[in-house]
Image (spheres, rainbow, N blue to C red):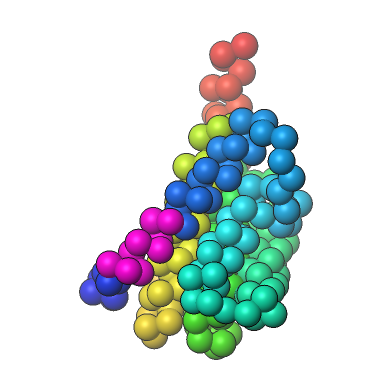
Amino acid sequence: MVRDMSPDFEKAELGSKIRAWSSAASDARMSGIPMPVMSSAGSGNHGITAILPVALFAEEQGMSEEKTAKGLLVSHLATAYVKSRTGRLSSTCGCAFAAGAGAAAGIAWLMSGDLDKAKSAVEIVVSNLIGMLCDGAKETCSFKVGTGSQEAYQAALLADRGVRLDVQGVVGNTIEETIENAARVASSMGAIEQTLLDIIDERK
């Protein structure tokens, strides 16, 4: 699997572009720039992660508007599914973890049209980013959005090459079990959430 994580330079360049554009969009949003952004699962930053990587990949491949729209639909649906299990507010960073999983599904579907590969891409992102914490809405969210976006692309590349994670950690026998396991982890992070709130309150 490690060998599969070394794409050719052209594909690596697209991954860097996805990260840069997504980070820049989030940075502009969190800095208060007066421009609209499409949300996903009720969040603007989720929308950036769920949309830009998929749209940039489709543009790079010269795909039609219709196919691009279908890829975005897969991304939004996968993002919404993950959020429906982990909750709208969570100690985990949904911008990277949930929307990144959605973007991975969308890109993997555009690459192959195979929903099983889309599921594999989701599991790769979930196993990778489940531990990323949300420490408040702020400008540095842009780094997490960039990470989630680039990891979504990387996960899609791996899934397209046939990489499928075995049962391990939060990864279960099915995609549903994997998401449920991730939701259990997210819901048990109350102590961490309180610690983060204490750190923020101490600055007042």
Q: In this view, does 156 lie to the left or right of 2?
A: right
Residue 63 placement: quadrant: bottom right
Which one is in front, 156 or 120? 156
Residue shown at 39% from the left, 56% from the top:
16
Residue shown at 54% from the left, 70% from the top:
59
Q: Quadrant of the N terminus?
A: bottom left
Instruction: Give x and y (percent) for residue 163.
Output: 38, 80
Count the labels in the image: 0
Q: Is residue 37 left or right of residue 154?
A: right
Residue shown at 37% from the left, 83% from the top:
161
Q: In which quarter of the image is the C terminus?
A: top right
Instruction: Give x and y (percent) for residue 177.
Output: 58, 73
In the rendered image, the residue lying farthest to the top is 204
- Please determine whether, in this image, residue 121 is positioned above or below residue 90: below
Instruction: Give x and y (percent) for residue 45.
Output: 64, 47
| Observer able to see residue 193 | no
In the rendered image, the residue lying farthest to the left is 3
Q: In this view, does 162 lie to the left or right of 117?
A: left
| Observer able to see residue 138 | yes
Residue 30 placement: quadrant: top right
- Please determine whether, in this image, residue 24 is positioned above or below residue 173: above
Image: magenta residue range: 9-17
Instruction: Give x and y (percent) for residue 17.
Output: 43, 56
Instruction: Examine the structure image and report whether residue 169 is included in the region drawn in magenta.
Output: no
Residue shown at 56% from the left, 38% from the top:
27
Which one is in front, 190 or 15? 15
Query: Mainly helix, strand or loop, the magenta region?
Result: helix
- Please determine whether, in this image, residue 112 is positioned above or below residue 181: below
